[in-house]
């Protein structure tokens, strides 16, 4: 892709629309069907070293941090290596214990975010092994890391990240699959995930074809001063990223919470003026998520669900195509990018350059 607007009014809209092609690009040439394995040339981590990894710590800021949260879940699910994500800025200021058996992964669209770069430099100084999951080729973080993978999202101009988020999560799925197949993921499960990854571009196009309906939903909820976003396990980072998107472009206050934690506080906020966006995948937690919708409905809360089937308790449902359970988070956030976009557009916001924000924060 180029910097040309290609008929779109904003870069955000252009970049959202490019996601099927972008995902196709990150997958291209990296899958070996014979062994259901993945080839990530730049990792600099051989099979013996990969087997020695006891823990994975993912570091990033903003949207990249959220992509890292989904990445950590994918690594735990597919490779069974304990993994978690943390904002790079928090990590570097808390004098973290740097463990030789931990593999560190720095995530960044620009590859220039100062907090991430400083965390990488501190880790390197302490002898840790650091991989980069980066979009901009040859950027500072890519150069500083011991190895890694590019996410091939193409140039992203809008301050608010969309296609790079999606591609970063797909890159993590590839990394998780790679590590999984070196460890205990079976050939059959590897094939299942590969087939799922290959379905993503067409399913993304299907979601984007629904833009008119999503625009109508945005109009339904545009009167809200504040919105709650909920999800559980795989759905929680999706909810966090969707809330961040809405905040960044529309300036509407949005709060993301694990669905299970509602009853421990935020339920007090629920009333008709505080709508909830709920991530409700068709997985083993479906009934639990439905129970959360009931709790909200009982308090007269309005609900917009993003789900694989229409949710009776919700006022509106955006139905998205089903993939493998592990890969569903990649798709479920995409309609909510359009939701944030259309909300902000209706409010006349400066979509590509929201107030007070910068595309890349290269200072402390
Ligand atoms: C800034 C941008 C965010 C972005 C974050 C991390 O705050 O406004 O959209 O997610 O930096 O940027 P990076 O380039 O490291 O992914």
Image: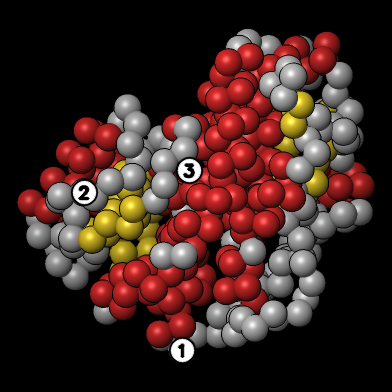
Res 62 label = none
Where does label 3 land, which residue?
A: 329
Q: Nearer the viewer, residue 338 or 232?
A: 338
- Ligand 1 neighbours mark 1 (CB distance < 8 Å): no
Q: From what the image shows, is residue 76 above or below residue 282?
A: above
- Ligand 1 neighbours mark 2 (CB distance < 8 Å): no
Mark 2, secondary structure of its residue: loop
Q: Earlier in the sequence, mark 2 or mark 1?
A: 2
Q: Nearer the viewer, mark 3 or mark 1?
A: 3
Q: Nearer the viewer, mark 2 or mark 3?
A: 2
Regarding residue 357, the answer to whether it shows in the image is no
The percent position of residue 265, horizontal first and vertical second, equals 23, 47
Q: From what the image shows, is residue 25 above or below residue 360?
A: above
Q: Earlier in the sequence, mark 2 or mark 3?
A: 2
The C terminus sits in image quarter: bottom right
Res 348 label = 1
Q: Nearer the viewer, residue 26 or 118?
A: 26
Q: CA distance from mark 2 to mark 3?
A: 18 Å
At x 86%, y 19%, the residue is 46
Q: Where, by quadrant of the figure, is residue 280 drawn? A: top left
The percent position of residue 257, horizontal first and vertical second, equals 35, 48
Mark 1 surroundings within 10 Å by alpha-carbon count, few (fewer than 14), some (14 through 19), many (20 or more): few
Mark 3, secondary structure of its residue: helix
At x 70%, y 81%, the residue is 5
Where does label 2 land, which residue?
A: 311
């Amino acid at each position: 892709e180029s910097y040309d607007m290609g008929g779109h009014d904003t870069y955000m809209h252009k970049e959202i629309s490019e996601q099927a092609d972008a995902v196709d690009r990150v997958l291209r040439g990296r899958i070996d069907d014979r062994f259901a394995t993945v080839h990530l040339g730049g990792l600099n981590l051989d099979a013996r070293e990969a087997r020695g990894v006891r823990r994975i710590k993912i570091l990033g800021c903003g949207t990249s941090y959220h992509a890292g949260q989904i990445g950590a879940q994918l690594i735990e699910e597919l490779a069974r290596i304990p993994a978690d994500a943390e904002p790079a800025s928090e990590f570097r200021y808390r004098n973290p214990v740097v463990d030789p058996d931990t593999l560190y992964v720095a995530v960044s669209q620009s590859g220039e975010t100062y907090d991430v770069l400083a965390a990488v430099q501190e880790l390197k100084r302490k002898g840790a092994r650091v991989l980069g999951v980066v979009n901009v080729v040859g950027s500072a973080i890519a150069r500083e890391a011991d190895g890694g993978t590019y996410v091939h999202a193409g140039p992203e101009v809008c301050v608010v990240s969309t296609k790079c988020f999606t591609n970063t999560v797909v890159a993590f799925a590839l990394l998780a699959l790679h590590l999984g197949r070196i460890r205990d993921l079976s050939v059959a499960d590897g094939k299942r995930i590969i087939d799922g990854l290959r379905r993503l571009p067409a399913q993304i196009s299907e979601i984007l074809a629904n833009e008119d309906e999503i625009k109508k939903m945005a109009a339904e909820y545009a009167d809200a001063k504040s919105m709650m976003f909920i999800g559980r396990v795989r759905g929680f980072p999706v909810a966090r990223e969707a809330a961040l998107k809405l905040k960044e472009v529309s300036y509407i206050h949005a709060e993301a919470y694990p669905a299970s934690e509602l009853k421990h506080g935020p339920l007090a906020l629920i009333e008709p003026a505080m709508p909830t966006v709920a991530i409700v995948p068709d997985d083993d937690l479906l009934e639990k998520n439905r129970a959360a919708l009931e709790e909200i409905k009982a308090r007269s809360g309005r609900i917009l669900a993003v789900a694989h089937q229409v949710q009776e308790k919700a006022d509106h449902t955006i139905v998205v195509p089903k993939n493998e359970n592990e890969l569903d988070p990649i798709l479920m956030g995409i309609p909510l990018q359009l939701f944030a976009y259309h909300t902000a557009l209706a409010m006349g916001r400066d979509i590509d350059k929201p107030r007070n924000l910068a595309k890349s924060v290269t200072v402390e």
